[in-house]
Amino acid sequence: MAAISAICLLLPNCGRSETPAPPTAAVAPTGQKYELKLYHLHTGESLDVVYRIGDTYIPAAMDKLNHFLRDHRTQDQSHYDPKEFDLLHSLMARLGKNGSVIDVVCGYRTPWSNNFLRTRGGTASPAVTGVAKNSQHMQAKAIDIRVPGVTTSKLRDVALSLHDGGVGYYPVSQFVHVDVGPVRQWTFAGRDSD
């Protein structure tokens, strides 16, 4: 018997159950849930998504946001900078509107769409159209928004108070541009584009 036990020590599974160990469960992220509720004014689509838990961005949610914010003219998608979503979340928290819907006027723009908007007035001047040649929209770092029940001037003021990127105020078309590019601000009071 001792000889069998000695041989058993040399074999990897000798004397042990052949039942495989249970698979380890994926560790779910923990912490605060970051949720956005969006409505796209051009596509009529709505999205309610938890995009981050604690410090972990959720890949499937990021994919949904990238699709939702696609260029509505060409249907092309990009990969949004997650800081843009954090900016929207912080903005809604500062407004006391967590859980409220954000109306999206414009998300990602392809270079073609951006040029189309710049030249709609027959000129390539942002002074006429309000569209920058190198817009943060083309880098998937900007969204033009409205928040129902909040004036655009208040939305602008709260966005400026965050000091988190660019804030453009478009009072004629009643929207605010928020991006995660350099901190700057502007007002466009002419004929607005989206």
Image (cartoon, helix red, strand yellow):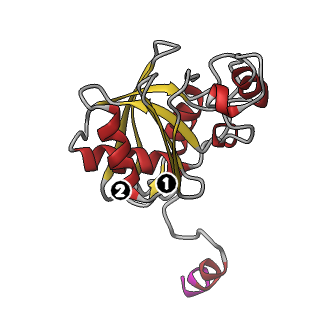
Q: Where 182 sits versus 145, above or below?
A: below
What segment is highlighted magenta in the picture?
1-5
Tag 1 residue: 23
The x, y position of residue 172, in whole percent, is 45, 23
Nearest the viewer among 9 and 115 is 115
Q: Nearer the viewer, mark 2 or mark 1?
A: 2
Residue in view at x 62 percent, y 26 percent: 70
Q: Is residue 181 visible?
A: yes
Question: Decide: marks 2, 1 in contact (CB < 8 A)?
Answer: no
Secondary element at image label 1: loop
Nearest the viewer among 188 and 132 is 188
The x, y position of residue 118, in whole percent, is 72, 26
Instruction: Sort mark 2 into few (<14), some (14-19) or many (20+) by Cα contacts within 10 Å.
Output: few
Residue 88, quarter of the rendered image: top left
Taking the image as shown, residue 147 lies to the left or right of residue 130, namely left
Q: Where 74 sits versus 49, above or below?
A: above
Residue kind at label 1, given as amino acid type = Pro
The x, y position of residue 189, in whole percent, is 50, 30
Closer to the N terminus: mark 2 or mark 1? 1
Is 2 a magenta residue? Answer: yes
Nearest the viewer among 112 and 23 is 112
The residues bearing labels 2 and 1 have C-alpha atoms spaced at a distance of 48 Å
- The numbered dot on residue 161 is 2
Residue 175, quarter of the rendered image: top left
